[in-house]
Amino acid sequence: MNTRRIFSQARRGNLPSDFDNWSLTDDRGRPVAHVAATYGHLPADFDQWEIASQTGHTVAHVAATNGHLPDDFDQWDLTDSEGVTVREESEYHRDHN
């Protein structure tokens, strides 16, 4: 499957159930996991929250920004490249939306 198609499927939530190449990046250095997190399409058992984009943002930060962290998320102290925790990102998102 080509990269463009994978990213398109991640946006729509149509990746195969056995997909596991979450760190695959597009031409801007954005991992496919970030796309799925943006649209709320990460699988329930997703556990690679630390995958970072070229700019240093983790999957967890992207999910927090977009309101898509799962109820059982427990990596609140995970930091991005600027030292911002997921907790801080989540609180900022909650307070500004």
Image: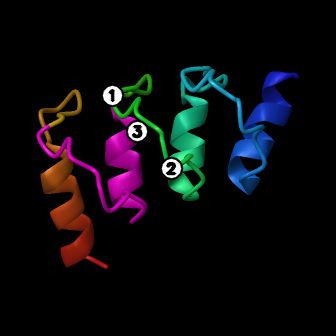
The Cα atoms of the two marked residues, 3 and 2, are separated by 14 Å
Mark 1 neighbour class, 10 Å CA radius: few under 14, some 14 to 19, many 20 or more = some
Q: Is residue 26 above or below residue 65?
A: above
Colour scheme in the image? rainbow
Label 3: which secondary element: helix
Residue for badge 2: 44
| Residue at horizontal 17 percent and vertical 32 percent from the top | 82
Q: Position of residue 8 (x, y in %)?
A: 79, 43
Precedes in sequence: disc 3 or disc 2? 2
Which quadrant would the C terminus be assigned to in this image? bottom left
The Cα atoms of the two marked residues, 2 and 1, are separated by 16 Å
Q: Which residues are magenta?
A: 56-77
Label 2 amino acid?
Answer: Ala
Residue for badge 1: 50
Q: Is residue 94 above or below residue 21?
A: below
Which quadrant would the N terminus be assigned to in this image? top right
Label 1 amino acid?
Answer: Glu
Residue for badge 3: 59
Residues marked 2 and 1 touching at CB (< 8 Å): no
